[in-house]
Image (tube, rainbow, N blue to C red):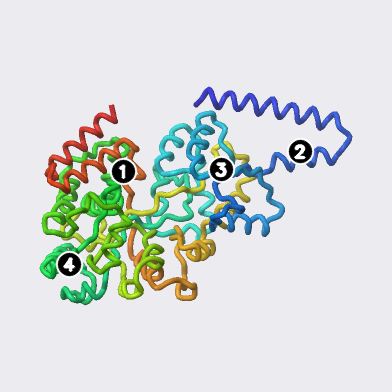
Amino acid sequence: MKKGFKRMTAMMLISSLVLVATACGSNDATEGTDEAKATSKIKFMHMYDKNSSQPSHQAELIEQFKAANPDVTFDEEIQSHDNYETKIKTLAAANELPDVFLVKPSMVSTFVENGLLLPLNDQLDKNTAWKEGFNEGVLDPYTIDGKTYGIQMTGGPTHVIYYNKELIANAGFSEFPKTWTEFETLINKLVEQKITPIALGNKGKWVANSSYMSTLGDRFTGTEWFTSLIDNKGAKFTDPEFVQALGALKNLVTIGAFNKDMNSIDNNQQRTLYYNGKAAMFIEGNWAVTAIETSAPKEIIENTAVAVFPAIEGAKGDQNSVSGGGGWAYAVNTNIDPAKLDNIQKLIQSVTDSEAAKLMLKYGDIPSSKVENIEGIELTPISKDLLKLLETTKYSPIYDTRLSPALTEAMNTILQEMMIDKYTPEQAAEVLQKEYDNEMK
């Protein structure tokens, strides 16, 4: 990357000399002004097309910013969602990143190591309300050694328990269990009543990892363990706390928490079991709210409430943590012209703060920033309940967005096989560790 920076510096110097020569040889003052405006344009690459058939809150918010700030000009490039990651990685490799762009958590450490990202702490500090308005833990995937390199606009949880209040009450629980022991007792009661406790569709393999293990793992290990793992600083899948988390998931299978065909149906089919009243719960991310409200029978919608895994007695991690956040975030080129930073700060704030969050909610998305007076916003009851629930939780890493694609696929497969008794939790941990060691060589 150092050679790349030298080439960039040389090109910038040549360009500057050309501009100076042109200005000196011209009697037209307007030409110099036009050149100055061109160099002050913010180069902005994103994936939010205002003319798309599926408009987004970010496209609307960007257009609102432009209308409110006509003096801020952009050199804007809009990529499709499918092409964006490849494009941004290509530009990063060539050291040709725009001023403002989007990054995923899995990109951050590599980009930082190569000196491509500007820490945004100073920009956040300019507005305390903005800085303190984010949900707890939401910026952690973009923070290294106390420096924040990305500011996320949305990022809901991948773990939400959607449950039927009537079926839970019939099993003797007037409210959702507060402890893991009570949770297992509820499952046993439902099994006795011949109700499937939790509908699970893990055919695609990702549900058990993203919606179950990411939260269970953090509850047992604490987030520091996962940070150590991805940084290759000593944590192992064979550590006792992680094995305990695997054991907790395996025990749910043992006590009959899931449908027998859990690895043969997908997440859409797991919802159908719930909609038909054959299952008391299903576990998925925040995106399932819309599915329930548009596809479930009226009586199921009215009986649906939300929860997260209850506190696990004796576990090491934060017991209010749920896997979440970790989507795309706005980032800034480390070589940015300092004169552009004030406008860039205003732009990023305007599309991520609590005011922007209100629009995100109306689009059915979960914002990264907190929203006051939710009651005043037209939302469905389930959406409101979920937002209130998230006020009491903390986001923890989503394993399948932070681990490498190869290791994620290995983990997905191993979890699926453990749940059909191919591995014990201890054996599953050993196989995972071998995959991890091979990757780190």
* Visible residue check, residue 222: no
Q: Amino acid at mark 3?
A: Gln
The reply, left or right, for residue 11 in relation to residue 288 is right
Q: Earlier in the sequence, mark 3 or mark 2?
A: 2
Q: Amino acid at mark 1?
A: Thr
Q: Which residue is mark 2?
A: 35
Q: How far apart are the two marked residues, 4 and 2, measured between alpha carbons?
A: 71 Å
Q: How far apart are the two marked residues, 1 and 4, measured between alpha carbons?
A: 39 Å
Q: Earlier in the sequence, mark 1 or mark 3?
A: 3
Q: Element type at marker 3?
A: loop
* Visible residue check, residue 167: yes
Q: Earlier in the sequence, mark 2 or mark 1?
A: 2
Q: Which residue is mark 3?
A: 79
The reply, left or right, for residue 366 in relation to residue 192 is right
What crowding class fits label 2: few (fewer than 14 Cα within 10 Å), some (14-19), or many (20 or more)?
few
Q: Earlier in the sequence, mark 4 or mark 2?
A: 2
Q: Element type at marker 4?
A: loop
- Of 436 and 168, which appears nearest the observer? 168
Of discs 1 and 3, which sits in the foreground? 3
Q: Amino acid at mark 2?
A: Glu
Q: Element type at marker 1?
A: helix
Q: Element type at marker 2?
A: helix
The reply, left or right, for residue 35 in relation to residue 173 is right
Q: Which residue is mark 4?
A: 195
Q: How far apart are the two marked residues, 3 and 2, measured between alpha carbons?
A: 26 Å
- Residue 328 on image: x %, y %: 46, 48
